[in-house]
Amino acid sequence: MNIDGKAWRSIWVEKGGRSVGVIDQTKLPHSFETISIRSCNDAVRSIRQMVVRGAPLIGVTGAYGLMLALQKESSDSALKMAFDQLIETRPTAINLRWALKRVLDRVKPLPPSERSIAARQEADLIAEEDVAMCQSIGNHGLELLKVLAERRPKACQRKPLNLLTHCNAGWLATVDWGTALSPIYKANRSGLDVHVWVDETRPRNQGASLTAFELEREGIPHTLIVDNAGGHLMQHGDVDAVIVGSDRVTRRGDVCNKIGTYLKALAAQDNGVPFYVAMPYSTIDWSISDGLDEVPIERRSGLEVTQVYGLISQASREPLISSVQISPTSCESFNPAFDITPAKLVTSFITERGVTPATEEGLKRLYK
Amino acid sequence: MNIDGKAWRSIWVEKGGRSVGVIDQTKLPHSFETISIRSCNDAVRSIRQMVVRGAPLIGVTGAYGLMLALQKESSDSALKMAFDQLIETRPTAINLRWALKRVLDRVKPLPPSERSIAARQEADLIAEEDVAMCQSIGNHGLELLKVLAERRPKACQRKPLNLLTHCNAGWLATVDWGTALSPIYKANRSGLDVHVWVDETRPRNQGASLTAFELEREGIPHTLIVDNAGGHLMQHGDVDAVIVGSDRVTRRGDVCNKIGTYLKALAAQDNGVPFYVAMPYSTIDWSISDGLDEVPIERRSGLEVTQVYGLISQASREPLISSVQISPTSCESFNPAFDITPAKLVTSFITERGVTPATEEGLKRLYK
């Protein structure tokens, strides 16, 4: 997508494949900096420290991480070690395992000398497919939004279509376009009058920092709200639909996504607001059914709860990003990073193959 | 309640009634400072800037504000002007109107020369009654919590009773004891093993700053969580009950409280977790029925959303409280301060007269 008129992706190959460039997402929206990932260790650190984040982008970064590992040493044991190291970085999103497995399956049967080139090809393919899938999610979602906009009562037709999103499932969470935001980009570019309520998404504020940044650069009207406010807006008819991404969807349609998604789904149901989950097929974990019991929920540092990062206003020229402590300094905190929205609260999935109900039958119909 | 072994209230009369002392709640938990309110204008500023907050404490501060106004000038017109100035500070909580009206009704029939002394008596009475009511709420709530603790399955009896609260409805929100936290204080002092999940309560973080501060000083085990996490905890059986306060309860039992309360009530219902609202009778607005349509919801500055206050770690000795900007600097934001939890989501009210269902009949049975 565009930043100040220049087309960007969230990840790209540099120096003939000797390194991979990414945007340092921990610095956004205050500072736009890129980083070169030069080794598997760099890839591990980037995922762990959330320089890159978002289930699809983590998957692609993992795939390139394997490529970089194989450039250095391409034996079976080195391959296994890199795979294990990368897969342990984030436990919840399934796309990482899916992408790593894809590269592994591609290179494993090859002689070591051919592995790094094949890994590069597979990682490139995963990245390009991700862009195509996100575009397709956008196109299917656009049709849905058009119908939603038209079906509103006449009196509401002059208002923008109000969409609420949680966390960041935009182009920064994928390679390009995004999942939840892709239909919104397509809608805006096609002339549909849209407005986005942006959940700040505590504790890491990916809504306030990343989604707000993306929408601003694309020129899409949006308003930041605290995570607490979405229910109130729905009660007053100010939300026409909720669209979120996902880190893992079970076979029967339970949705694992950023902590707090479940609360918005409950409010959507209570107020008759459609709740859509946009995702590519790599997000589906066919091996599990019950989201609550079977998806491992990452617990992150409590410091993400007690300390908030942002820009300190100051006189000097360089932007200064710092944290402030919001609680007593000795305060205990607990920080589960994801929650499960049961399938019954999901109106439909928006996938690269079309829109489908959140049921096992619905998913199987698309992915036979 | 106690701070480091010394008993405190949130508001007290100083200098024979020429001023009123309060704790500057905007500085907590990082710095404990008191402020003297010396005039009606001081009282207005203190309420507006949230030096004092919490529906019952706002009411008492308003009552003393009228006293200070009458000390300066006690004519009918001065009385009316002070009343109007104070009532406009915060539109949502009903306790302010109730307390101001009580002082007004008491002093209006009197000759101007007797008004300020009578106002002092009435304000003192309101404050003392508030303490007594909060104590009584605590006693009734304690009985409820004892039953809850005993009714848990045997396997859970060794775990602490896990309570979740939103915002701050502790002694800092009243004169002493609090509403939602009063039963928790009583439970802890009576030896019941309790643990409190503290919602941080964006945008102003009264949970992270005030509730965590109160519980720490009283030595009650607690854990800070982001507002997004409560639903996840309830899904996993880690919350035995939710207890919150209220800024206004309608005749039929709809509850206006800090933004985000509604989302917790939905999650409680979805997971079979009891949802209690603790409040004195001054919180009931008998004049209205439908919370969604009839309670004015205060909209506060969007800067509360885009900027987060806290303690900056630094070398100097004095604690430095500053804000950080979490969004792009030009980002629009919307900041409704309260929401409505429909009566159907409330298990019971805990009042100074006992526990009652959230219905018109339930409320009328207590307050004939």
Image (cartoon, coloured by chain):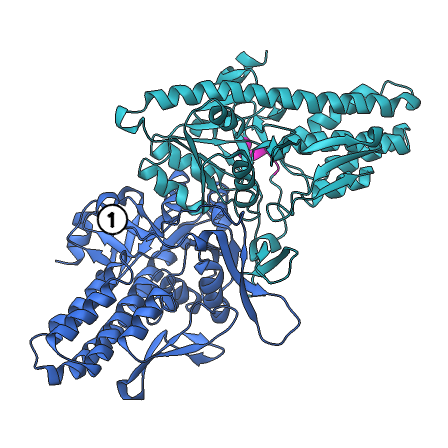
Chain colours: A blue, B cyan
Residue B319 visible, this orientation: yes
The residue at 83%/38% (across/down) is: B39
Residue B21, image quadrant: top right
Would residue B235 be found to the left or right of residue B47 on screen? Answer: left
Membership of B295 in magenta stretch: yes
Residue B49, x across and y down, in percent: 69, 46
Residue A6, image quadrant: bottom left
| Viewport quadrant of the N terminus of chain B | top right
The residue at 33%/71% (across/down) is: A175
**Extent of the magenta region:** B291-296
| Viewport quadrant of the C terminus of chain B | top right
The residue at 21%/63% (across/down) is: A97
Relative to A12, is B121 above or below?
Answer: above
Instruction: Between residue B263 and residue A236, name the one nearer to us.
Output: B263
Asked which secondary structure carries label 1, the reply is loop
Relative to A5, is B235 above or below?
Answer: above
Residue A182, x across and y down, in percent: 36, 65
Q: Which residue is mark 1?
A: A358
